[in-house]
Image (spheres, rainbow, N blue to C red):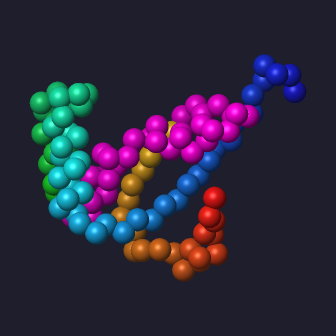
Amino acid sequence: MSDEEGKFLRLTVELTVEVLDVDALQAAALKEIRHPDADLNDEERQEQAELVSGDETGATALQWLIEPDHVLALVEHIQEVEPREAVLGVEPSDGPSDDEDEHDHDH
């Protein structure tokens, strides 16, 4: 393989978080949505605010607070790779999986 050809790897990270205060999480997301620098028009801003406020799980709020670029920071310190793309999805969970302890790694 020449230096000009690249191989791509898809990194999958699964993280389960416990929401301790849904109201505070939603308030933080609403603050981001209402921030003047948010790339939203008034209609989009209203729609997103309603989605965040109407989601009792907090998943929509959390998705507003974690930017996909934050995920790229996981590999930015590795000189042998070049981060290209990050996609983030947040969904409700029933809690930590039973085998969570088997996969815990302290790095």
Q: Is residue 100 above or below residue 42?
A: below
Is residue 60 highlighted in magenta? yes
In the rendered image, the vertical position of residue 103 relative to residue 41, given as above or below: below
Taking the magenta stretch, the answer to whether it contains residue 30 is: no
Residue at 51 percent across and 75 percent down: it is: 97
Q: Is residue 19 left or right of residue 93?
A: left
Q: Nearer the viewer, residue 31 or 60?
A: 31
- Residue 80 is situated, as x and y percent measured from the top left of the image, at 73, 34
Quadrant of image for the C terminus = bottom right
Q: Residue at x 36, y 64 (%)?
A: 92
- Give the magenta part as a residue range: 56-85
Residue 1 image offset from top left, x and y in percent: 87, 27
Residue 10 visible at all: yes
Residue at horizontal 24 percent and vertical 31 percent from the top? 38
Q: In the rendered view, does 99 fall on the left or right side of 29? A: right
Please state the horizontal and vertical placement of residue 82, each as a whole percent of the image.
Answer: 65, 31
Q: Can you see residue 87?
A: no
